[in-house]
Image (tube, rainbow, N blue to C red):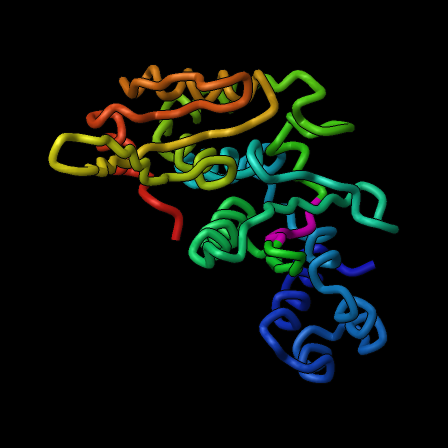
């Protein structure tokens, strides 16, 4: 067994591209052990890093966490890592048509859990951005079996405090995951011909009543008018409400 601090130094060096021979020379850890760690650095890092803000009293950027939490509630999930008991993988599904969103999700994960290797797994039409850690359930206690809309989604006290402080970031994460900004077009026939009116609006779609309630509650507290079009869809269409969302959300990129 190696001292956790020594192990972390070695893994960081491997993660930065140094060879096993060079890391051995600097740390004294055997090349055989370094080779095993190098085969799957993300999991080795996840098993080593004491980086959980909930377990290790580390500071947490509330605004970035609120944004990542919104992404997780929308298009995120946490799964057990195959073969590694107690290790989990957080993944955020990001549409490939929005490369900026992919980068934002990766940056948010790195900020909330520094030192983890953030990976990108390609799928049809999307990229799953994620990382391994033992502590994702600590940061997202809403994790549980089954799809999110089949179970109760409630904020614990410390999450409520963050969301209340960082409502704009939370709403931005929700819209970036399960929402969009579109331009609505209406045709009107007049005596002198057809006229087309265009105006922007936002949509948010989620199957979970609890998640939609969290979204609309945040809008209410921000003073942003909204309307429920059907059981799963929320729209924001009033000019002043759209302008307010444009201040901190805007179109996906």
Decide which of 150, 117 is in the foreground and name it: 150
Q: Can residue 230 be seen in this view?
A: yes
Magenta portion: prevailing SS class:
strand
Residue 122 drawn at (x, y percent): 65, 60
**Where residue 211 appears, x then y in whole percent?**
54, 22
User: 37 left or right of 42?
Assistant: right
Q: Which of 133 and 80 is in front in this view?
A: 80
- Identify which residue is drawn at 38% across, 17% down: 227
Q: In the depicted view, which residue is nearer to us: 164 or 26?
A: 164
Q: Which residue is drawn at 22% across and 32% down?
A: 243
Extreme residue toward the left, this view? 192
Q: Tell me the residue at 45%/19% (across/down).
A: 229
Left or right: where 186 falls relative to 25: left
Q: Residue at 26% x, 37% y: name it.
A: 246
Quarter that holds the N terminus: bottom right
| Residue that sits furthest to the front in the current view | 191
Magenta-highlighted residues: 128-133
x%, y% of residue 137? Answer: 68, 33
Q: Does the magenta stretch include residue 131?
A: yes
Is residue 178 rendered magenta in the image? Answer: no
Between 188 and 236, the one lying in front of the other is 188
Q: In which quarter of the image is residue 43?
A: bottom right
Instruction: Answer whether residue 61 is visible to the viewer in this image.
Output: no
Residue 224's spot in the image, x, y percent? 29, 21
Q: Measured along the vertical axis of the image, is residue 203 above or below residue 64?
A: above
């Amino acid at each position: 067994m190696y001292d956790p601090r020594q192990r972390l130094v070695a893994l960081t060096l491997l993660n930065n591209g140094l060879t096993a021979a060079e890391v051995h020379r600097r740390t004294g850890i055997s090349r055989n052990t370094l080779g095993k760690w190098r085969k799957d650095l993300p999991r080795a890092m996840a098993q080593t890093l004491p980086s959980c803000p909930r377990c290790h009293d580390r500071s947490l950027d509330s605004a970035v966490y609120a944004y990542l939490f919104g992404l997780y509630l929308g298009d995120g999930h946490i799964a057990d890592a195959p073969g590694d008991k107690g290790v989990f993988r957080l993944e955020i599904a990001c549409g490939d048509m929005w490369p900026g969103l992919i980068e934002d999700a990766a940056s948010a994960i790195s900020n909330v859990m520094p030192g983890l290797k953030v990976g990108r797994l390609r799928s049809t039409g999307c990229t799953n951005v994620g990382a391994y850690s033992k502590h994702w359930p600590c940061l997202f206690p809403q994790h549980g079996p089954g799809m999110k809309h089949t179970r109760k989604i409630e904020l614990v006290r410390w999450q409520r405090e963050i969301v209340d402080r960082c409502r704009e970031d939370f709403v931005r994460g929700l819209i970036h995951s399960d929402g969009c900004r579109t331009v609505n077009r209406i045709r009107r026939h007049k005596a002198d011909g057809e006229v087309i009116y265009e105006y922007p609006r936002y949509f948010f779609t989620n199957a979970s009543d609890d998640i939609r309630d969290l979204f609309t509650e945040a809008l209410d507290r921000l003073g942003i008018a909204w309307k429920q079009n059907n059981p799963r869809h929320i729209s924001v269409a009033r000019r002043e409400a759209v302008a307010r969302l444009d201040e901190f959300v805007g179109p996906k990129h």
